[in-house]
Image: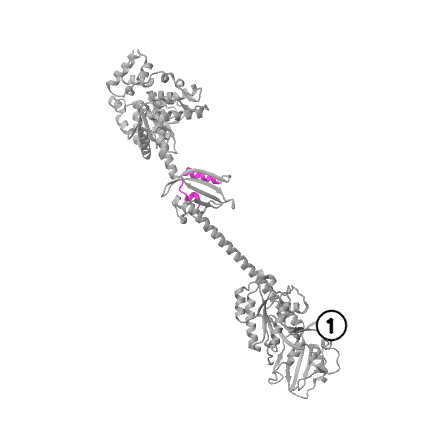
Amino acid sequence: MNRQNSDFEPVDDPLFNRVLSTLDVVVLERSDNGDAFHLRGLPPEWWCQRVGPTESPVLNSLQWSPFLQDYVADHHPAWDDKPGTIEKSGPWMESDRQGCIMTLEATALSIGSRRLLLIERLGAGFAQMQAIVQRAREKMLAEDVTMKSHRKAETSLMGQLEASERTKDDALALLQHLRLAALVLDERGCITFASDRGLEILGCTAKHMIGLAWDQVLPLQPQDRSMIREMIDASSADRKVGPLYIGGPRPAWVEMEVHRDLRQPGRQIVVLNDRTELHTLRQALSEQASFHDLVGKSRAMLRTYQLVRDVAQVDTTVLIEGETGTGKELIARAIHFSSARTHKPFIAANCAGLTDSILTSQLFGHKRGAFTGAVTDQQGLFEAAEGGTLFLDEIGDIPPPVQTALLRVLQEKEITRLGEARPRKVDVRVVAATHHNLSEDVIRGSFRADLLYRIRVARIQLPPLRERREDIPLLAHSFLSQLCAATGKTVDDLSPDTLRLLMSHVWPGNVRELKSAIEFAVISCKGRDILPTDLPPEIAAVPVAPNPSTWIPLSGQDEKSKLLAALADAKGNRTEAAKRLGVSRATFYRRLVELNIHPS
Amino acid sequence: MMQKKVCMLGGFAVGKTSLVRRFMTNVFSDHYQTTIGVTVEKKSVSVDNRDVMLMLWDLYGEDELQRVRESYLRGSSGYILVMDGTRKATVDTAIALQQTVVRTIGTVPFVSIINKSDRRADWEIDEGAIEQLRERGWTVLFGSAKLGQGVEELFALLATQMVSAPVLPRE
């Protein structure tokens, strides 16, 4: 068919009518002057409903919708200068006579010299496209809302973060300003925060601390470490301990407070209070008056404390010399507990008055059957003190065979149990004590010189109480407190007269005698203060010794004559003679034996 | 009666149809129904005691899915640029559309409105952006199709501007 054929009249073609009806399209032909449109073919039903019944095939465009009017009034190249092109109006919506909304689209085109306007009602395809666009836009809007919500949340979080950073900075500045030393531990005990002051006290850098377990990082003593572990594990909210020694480049004494983080119960806040200065001052103050269980602030005692500290640093054998009751065992204990052996045993043995076999068995142990009564294998004191300290009191009284065995132990560092041949290695520090003058014993031949030199590597001489009388009030008050605590008795003080008596007494039994006297007085005391009458009669009644030089030095013929004179004055009564000389009865007896005096 | 074609222009979902509905029937619906194509509404207003028939061409929103056909703009005596205060991007769309209009039909009166002033707390369009629009010579109104705020004023202002503007010959 020639589409350009001007004779073509589709109006009469039934097939053309059916095609138009099927496509839902209205075909209008524009008049040459453009004023009118002629309906061509049979229009679809919707068109009739829209424009109403009309007999005339000529349509008045002024009755059309504004959109269509606008469209046909517009210039269309398809109708004028560009025949063969097709121009679509794009969809528009309008309602029919019943008010139903229709979506229409117009198309302008030319066929030959004839200008046609097709009006199509958009159907299912358009509705589908509309639904897709609707969904897409709804999705875009929803995404926009989500994005805004995210942005808002982000802004809010950033704000919170900023505020939190500010708070943190403020808190850090405050910590810094207050010089507060604090650590924060997480649930696993790892350090998550350490203030500058905390790092300073601990002598660590944050790099070497943050993220690590506290017990790996803090330079604590082992016993303190376990104590803090227990404290952290404890359920109480706040716990305090100290002062504790912190090692490292800057040793310090700190008090530790552990607080549960109330915001996160698994976390702990550890506050460190540097008490180094306070501790040093307290220690200095305390050391002025006491050292371990030793009491006294006299120059002689302060010298002794220092000597003990020095001796504790080395592992040599020590000989402690002093009269009975001066506290030789206390010195030995102080050496042990100031030394590196502090966590190992301290065993004290008195060597006086024992036979050599018993002493040997006691010191070195024995094998079952080694002697009558040895029913089981028994370890000796050397083995019992393994790693620690063995205090041998009255070493001057050791029988010669034991001296030999002891020398061997000190030289070889091994012992052999009685009845055994196999030596056993021992690591024991020996601290010996005596009231003898061992040098004289060596001269006399009662003590082995080589053993003396072996045990007297370090030497501490304890002053008798009468040579440190300024310590008597301190000691008396110390014993008074101890005894009151032990007996539950309330005795507040010593009367001035009592104190004067105590100060003027010779104290041949030294500190031990003073302690006994105070114990006696506490028992006797009926009031709040100890009166002279509460003291033992020999102290209360005996006139004050006029001259402290009545002390008998352990040397020379002079001593012997003084003992004899005292005996004569006391008419042979040894107790009375000892009292007159200001020594204990035991010392007096011992001196008599040592100086070969046999009173009738 | 004087007839004036007015195009409603703006990004999608800024509230063009809602403004027209509020103006035409004083009704508002929260349900968003996208416009595809064009709906033309007519309403008569009085300007200086002269009746003016406004032919409101409610065009589909401009976005990457649909571009406004220039043919729709032809014959417009004025236009309204609608923006959504809660979406800053609708300002850029409005600016682009305004440039399209000028390119297509030249300079005709227009008024812009930032819709959704009922959700002022959620607005993204700030004072700085509004000031920039005014610096471009735009008349910027604020309104809410939901509350009916600024709607009458919007159309009345444009009608006044159109009546006093010289009539351009149709291309």
| Marked residue chain, label 1 | A
Front-lying residue, A296 or A438: A296
Task: Report the coloring of the rendering.
Answer: one colour
Give the residue number, with chain letter if any, for mark 1.
A98
Q: Is the stretch drawn in magenta largely helix, strand or loop?
A: helix
The image shows residue A387 at horizontal and vertical percentages of 36, 33
Instruction: Give above or below for B157 relative to A593.
Output: below
Front-lying residue, A170 or A484: A170
Front-lying residue, A250 or A163: A163
What is the crowding at mark 1: few (fewer than 14 residues within 10 Å), some, or many (at least 20)? few
Q: If the image is split into quadrants, where does the N terminus of chain B sit? A: bottom right
The reply to whether the magenta stretch includes residue A215 is yes
Q: Is residue A418 in sight in this rendering?
A: no
Q: Secondary structure at mark 1?
A: loop
Instruction: Give above or below for A402 relative to A63.
Output: above
The reply to whether the magenta stretch includes residue B110 is no
Quarter of the rendering containing residue A150: bottom right
Indicate left or right for A532 with B25 as reference: left
| Residue, far front | B48
- Magenta region, residue range: A212-232
The image shows residue A500 at horizontal and vertical percentages of 35, 21
Instruction: Give above or below for A441 relative to A91.
Output: above
